[in-house]
Image: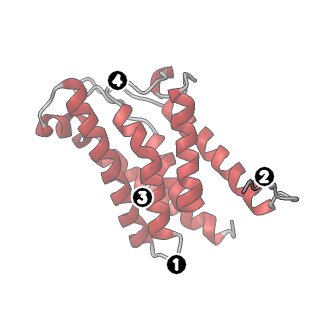
Amino acid sequence: MYRETTLSFPKQLSWTSLRSWKGALLFTALTAFGAHLAIHIPPTPVPITLQVFAVLLSGLILGARWGFVAQAQYVALGACGVPIFAFGNAGLSGPSAGYLLAFPLAAWLIGWLTQKRECSGLQQLAACGLGIAVIYGLGCTWLALYAHLSAQKAFLAGAAWFLPFDAAKAGLAVALSRLWRAAGD
């Protein structure tokens, strides 16, 4: 028998979802801004940027779903040719592509680990550490494949230089997210 299928749309847009979408757009823009604050370190093909800080903060503040959305929007815009990656680059090629692809996953993981319950600063810092591990894991894997490096050389070129900087970014992201929560969103 033939059954008619209709699409139904909500009669009213939820203010909560609108607010969440605006937050995701804000963090997409913050990540793009952080990409343009890039410093190239000669021994590594991957620049130091503030993108990781924005990824960590989006997971902590927006939670798993909207942190993922914010970073997926950022990666999708750059993949479509908008020059929002470091040094005004676009497209998912080059030595940094693995790091970029890991951003939505890292934001989701951090949000998932911290959004369901009240977490201490140390627990939030641990969640950020796991998020950074996801970024390094995918980033270094891509770098090894892209540049034909061994796992050790890829880690040295794609993670070791960044550890102290990303640890500082994690500490700052946790401090800011705690201030945000204390202010009542």
For residue 176, say whether it is visible: no
Q: Residue at x 31, y 27 (%)?
A: 95
* First in sequence: mark 1 vs mark 4: 4
Q: What element carries label 4?
A: loop
Q: Residue 94 carries which label?
A: 4
**Secondary structure of residue under mark 1:** loop
Vertical placement of residue 8 versus 135, above or below: below
Q: Residues within 10 Å of mark 4 (few under 14, many from 20)?
A: some
Q: Please tell me in which quadrant of the rendered image residue 8 appears.
A: bottom right
Amino acid type shown at disc 2: Leu
Which disc number belongs to residue 118?
1
Q: Kindly report the distance in space between the C-alpha atoms of the residues bearing marks 2 and 3.
A: 46 Å
Residue that numbered label 2 is attached to:
7
Q: Position of residue 159 (x, y in %)?
A: 25, 41
Residue corresponding to mark 3: 171
Of residues 173 and 25, the one drawn nearer to the viewer in this rendering? 25
Dot 3 amino acid type: Gly
Count of numbered circles on the image: 4
Tell me which label, 4 or 2, sits earlier in the chain.
Answer: 2
CB-based contact (under 8 Å), mark 4 and mark 3: no
Mark nearer the N terminus (2 vs 3): 2
Which dot, 4 or 2, sits closer to the camera? 2
